[in-house]
Amino acid sequence: MPSITATFARALRDAAGTLAAEAGTPPPGTPVAAVCAADAGAEDRLSDRDYFEEIERFRASHPDPAALVFAYAETVRSDALGTLGLAMHTAPTLRDSLRMVERYFRLVTDNAVYRLEEGEEAAFFAIEARTDPHPALDFRNECALAGFVRNLRRLAGDGLGPECVWFRHPGRGDGERYARALGCPVRFGAERDAIVLSRAALDLPNRLGDAGVSGFFSARLEAEIAEMGAEEPPLKAELLRRLTPGLSNGAPSAAAVARDMGMSERTLYRRLAEAGTTYRDVLQDAQTRLARELLGAGDCSISEVAFLTGFSEQSAFARAFKRRVGRTPAQYRRGCARL
């Protein structure tokens, strides 16, 4: 079952407590001391389910969820993330810090990943869910990206100035209020959840940047990754990243993907076999992940989901989805709607 460090739940608890103290009212919900499994003496991680239940309880019971997002951004600290936080702070540039998050964030949680995508004019630091749909997911994404905006400014200084912050879900309040709090334009209903940065911003030096110290912490992170065991081999992760955006143009051939990755088709097959998987399995995994996301969002018809995941016929998509998930696309969508 996916899990997450209790650090983030504690930060939300502390943010709610701060707002309550300022308002002269008790924190919402159950006693604050029992919010996190770590505070109750258990292991310092929460299951995916417990984490989302905690943050949904706070969101639903707080009179001003947007204020809670902003307070969380001020409360959560990257230096509370152990070795990853230290590596981020000592990385020479902001780009180096974000690449570390991209590679090592699975040490913190396996219910989300971050991707740094550099275009010709702008870069996108995007969060991608690795969990089933949940009512608190939009709120989690707001907290996560707001927290990163604040922490990136701590790393590189107030001159960072993100170009924009994007959220896929519709806005629930005053967009200008979000823009004032985050110090940059905020766009709801965007195509992804991401912080948009200029290419120049990625080259900003970190205040505590030290290549030697950062290298030491990076080596420790690599060792921690090795101890975890590679649940998702690097090659498979790279394939998933490359396959998903282009599925609407049809499922790409292994030969085309191998060429794009700078290797022969035979080499790609061999490396996948060494990782205990096949190209067909990875392709189906990419299609299933994207289908889950689209069906959960509810913005597309099932026929549109079939097309966007690379199927030419809805019936073929429905059969493939049921084989992988155990439910038809319609049954899966109804289950998401009840959440």
Image (cartoon, rainbow, N blue to C red):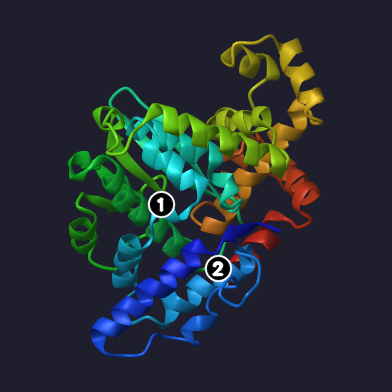
Q: Amino acid at mark 1?
A: Ser
Nearer-the-camera pick, 195 or 254: 195
Residue 271, horizontal then vertical, whole percent: 75, 20
- Judged by depth in the image, the label closer to the viewer, 1 or 2, is 1
Q: Which SS class for mark 2?
A: helix
What residue is rendered at 65% in x and 71% in y?
Answer: 42
Q: Which residue in the structure is indicated by mark 2?
A: 52
Looking at marks 1 and 2 on the same chain, the residue that comes earlier in the sequence is marked by 2
The answer to whether any part of residue 231 appears in the image is: no
Q: Which residue is mark 1?
A: 78
In the displayed structure, would residue 88 be above or below residue 35? above
List x then y, in percent, for residue 273.
Answer: 81, 24
Q: In the picture shown, does residue 179 fall above or below 61?
A: above
- Residue 328 in which image quadrant: bottom right
Left or right: residue 266 versus residue 25 is right
Determine the residue positioned at 76% across, 34% down.
281
Q: Nearer the viewer, residue 317 or 283?
A: 283
Furthest-bottom residue in this view: 25
